[in-house]
Image (cartoon, rainbow, N blue to C red):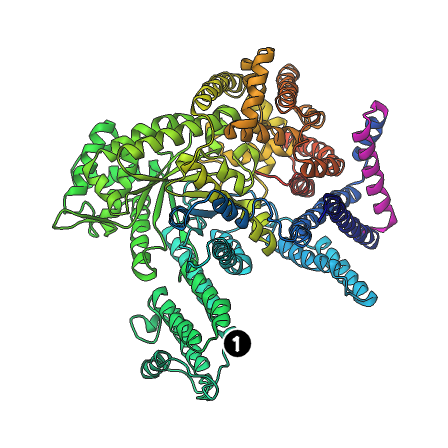
Amino acid sequence: MTELTVAANKSNSNNLLRRDVRFLGNILGEVLVHQGGNELLEIVEKIRETSKSLRSVFLPELYDDFKNIVETLEPDIRHQVIRAFAIYFQLVNIAEQNHRIRRKRDYERSAGEAVQPGSIESAIQDLRERNMDVTEVESIIESLSLELVMTAHPTEAMRRAILDIHKRISEDVMLLDNPTLTFREREQLREKLLNEVITLWQTDELRTGKPTVLDEVKNGMYYFHETLFHILPDVYQELERCLTKYYPGQNWHVPTYLRFGSWIGGDRDGNPSVTADVTWKTLRMQRKLSIREYQRILSEYMQYLSFSTSIVDVSDELLDSINKDREHVTVTKMNIWHNEKEPYRIKLVYMMEKMINVLDDSKNGTAERYTSPEEFIADLGVIDRSLRHHYADYVADTYINKLIRQVELFGFHTAALDIRQHSQEHENAMKEILANVELTPDYSALTEEEKIELLAKLLTEPRPITSNYHVYSESTKECLDVFRTVYRAQQEYGKHCITSYLISMAEGASDILEVIVFAKEVGLFRQNSDGTVECTLQSVPLFETIEDLNAAPEIMRTLFNLPIYRQSIASRNDLQEIMLGYSDSNKDGGAVTANWELRVALKELTAVGEEFDIKLKFFHGRGGSLGRGGMPLNRSILAQPASTIGGGIKITEQGEVISSRYSLQGIAYRSLEQATSALITAAINARYPESDALDEEHWDNIVREMSEVSRNKYQDLIFRDPDFLSYFKESTPLPEVGELNIGSRPSKRKNSDRFEDLRAIPWVFSWTQSRYLLPAWYAAGTGLQSFYDNKEENLKTMQDMYENFSFFTSLVDSLQMAIAKADMVIAKEYANMSKNDEARDRIFGLIAEEFKLTSELILKITGQKEILDNVPVIQESIRLRNPYVDPLSYLQVQLLSELRGLRDKDEDNAELLREVLLTINGIAAGLRNTG
């Protein structure tokens, strides 16, 4: 395939994207006329054209004309205009997601034998080209570990009903590529899409109330049911295919290296709605999902396993297992398979019955149900070996192997559920319990050293400190009930259903030890008579603020020095999980400092682990937005120092990221394939580091100094400017974001207006809506300038760093992505809502000046003419989207001003608030970012 042909195919592919956008846009135009008449369509088109012209050439008279059109809209029309632009973005997003799948298929079709960059095959091919032998490749594959953890962090602005419509539209648009469609079929497809867009128009995009925690659990489970159960085994199958291709003669069965976990129903930090009872119901819901999936798959396999003993000889092992099932498993006459010549179907009937009985508590402890996933896998193994006995290997590989992999991945619990709670809750409960048994009158008054000594002693003593006869406060009772729930879950669902207990705002070793003491009280930690320790629940510190990140290495060293704690780690294969928070560190010190401090913490913590011969598994709490560490999954893996991934990686998947990555199977597969490729690449980099260690040390020192300057600049505005907090609240939709029902969790940790108590999500969400995107870039320019200092030799050093220092490359590219999405012209419209003229002009002036400096330095460092020249696809997408986002931004400013004017007079207008919330949804869809 020549380069010209590949280029032609790429151009044709882009034409198909434009075709889909135009096709869906035309359908939306028809819906606008159908629902609002020609007047609505004409107004929308006039606003769109004017906005587009303004983006081409900014003329004051055109700008005034544009604002006049927007501000003089009648309320009824205005409401429809907002929805028209918002729905347009939803349709464009669908087209772009479909196009990602199409591009991958086009590449595979046109490239022939060529291997796609970022694919699993490219990573295995790299191993082969490095002449790595089978033993080393096996070692690398066995070292891989990635867990993706879904959270219910409230950043998904769309309702489930809207996402369901999107999925149907996506599937229909994909059919447009089918060249065999007849003219009539194409017309029918268009009619179907027209009906779907009308349904979208007539479906309320706003929730009437906050979702419950169990609503959030259902939403999370949707992706397992629709996508992950099917796609995850395929990723494993592709890895095994590539290993067999490049390393033939080896019987490859890749160990479980990639799995999904969840916080939804387990994360109680700041969410009083997550109780022990809710956690138990969550586990039940998760179990029901996996069991019903297995029932469905077994039922489906009935049609494939019709092999007859009249033609083939099945194994004696299979026949013996059927006879054993006959003795113990009761099947209704209606379900019994009566054709004795088809033993596989007979066996499947018994397996389905045993699977149904897993959910029947009355069958608990009997032979009529599977008591563990291992028993189910054993039965599948019997079928697998029998199929191979009569040379039906293809059937075994295609169906039975995939199901075995699914059971290995999802067990009977679907996903490991993490528990998370704030450290203060544990301290409060410990204080009450210890005072109750008269061990210390005021635990909280003890020094950190005294707490550690007391807690370590409690762990070595067999006697309990709690009793069912003691009466505790509701909060302490709930704290203990959570641990009892974990114990019960591990007993009934297996030890893998809950393994990690995360402690947010962990500020000392005592915070981690408290959780172990509570675990001991319910049987999750025990010291045996021979002195050995068994611990089935890992206490995981979450270091979030910059101060906590700095303290983290010494905290872990203190813990590892405690013999009893070291024994607990030994019982968990010498593996310690540590979570690092990206949101609060960014909120504390800005993007440059947060990224730098996280890098330092990762390396120093890894060194502490090596000192004690303990492997560290880092859990990266990344959000979806740039201001909270958001980036593509493969980049987030490669952004870590290679030396820090030895114990495995966990990464949070939040809000809108979940739907954008996992709602479509094709995109989910590509994302997980790239993640696997990145994992293998990172493992190679860890073994064979390519960068010059002396250069990296020098570059680290440069970034350290940049970070200090950047942090001071950031904190001068955010923390030390007395007018900043008022400016933030008045010049962004922060108060109104709290009225968007997108999560069960409150937007503040406490009922307080202090900046420190504001969660990072609404902080980032509000700046994104107002087009500043301030948390993702502010103070970066000053940090970069502090080293550059207008000296050519320093610029050359930064260019060299951008080319060869992966940390700096990732940092600069994240900054330019944020700069590309930000818009100071529109941000100034939001700034005008600030009531203090002097403070507004001063603060906005500082922000605009820093924006200009950051933009200029990025271009100097990268050598680009324009921001995002390095990613033209995204650059073009942002350029095309902006004229459609702009009207929503201007409308939002107008609506916020009207609504706040009414509220200042103790009046309100529900319809006005609704329109504000619709603009929030629309801008979120347009920028493809919330929090």
Q: Residues within 10 Å of mark 1 (few under 14, many from 20)?
A: few
User: Residue 402 location in percent, x, y?
Assistant: 48, 64
Q: Is residue 39 magenta?
A: yes
User: Residue 236 location in percent, x, y?
Assistant: 48, 56
Instruction: Give the position of the C terminus as an image quadrant.
Output: top right
Q: Is residue 408 visible?
A: yes
In percent of the image, x 40 and y 69: which residue is there?
Answer: 359
Q: Quadrant of residue 832?
A: top right
Left or right, 226 with respect to 484, comes to right
Q: Amino acid at mark 1?
A: Tyr
Residue carrying label 1 = 304
Seen as rendered, the residue at the extreme left is 529
User: Residue 547 location in percent, x, y?
Assistant: 39, 25
In the image, residue 531 above or below residue 711: below
In percent of the image, x 50 and y 18: which residue is there?
Answer: 706
In percent of the image, x 30 and y 74: which residue is there?
Answer: 366
Nearer the observer, 374 or 773? 374
Magenta stretch, main secondary structure class: helix
Nearer the observer, 697 or 340? 697
Region of the chain picked out in magenta, as a range: 36-61
Left or right, 382 with respect to 50, comes to left
Q: Is residue 206 magenta?
A: no
User: Residue 53 location in percent, x, y?
Assistant: 83, 32
Q: Is residue 292 visible?
A: no
Q: Quadrant of residue 835?
A: top right
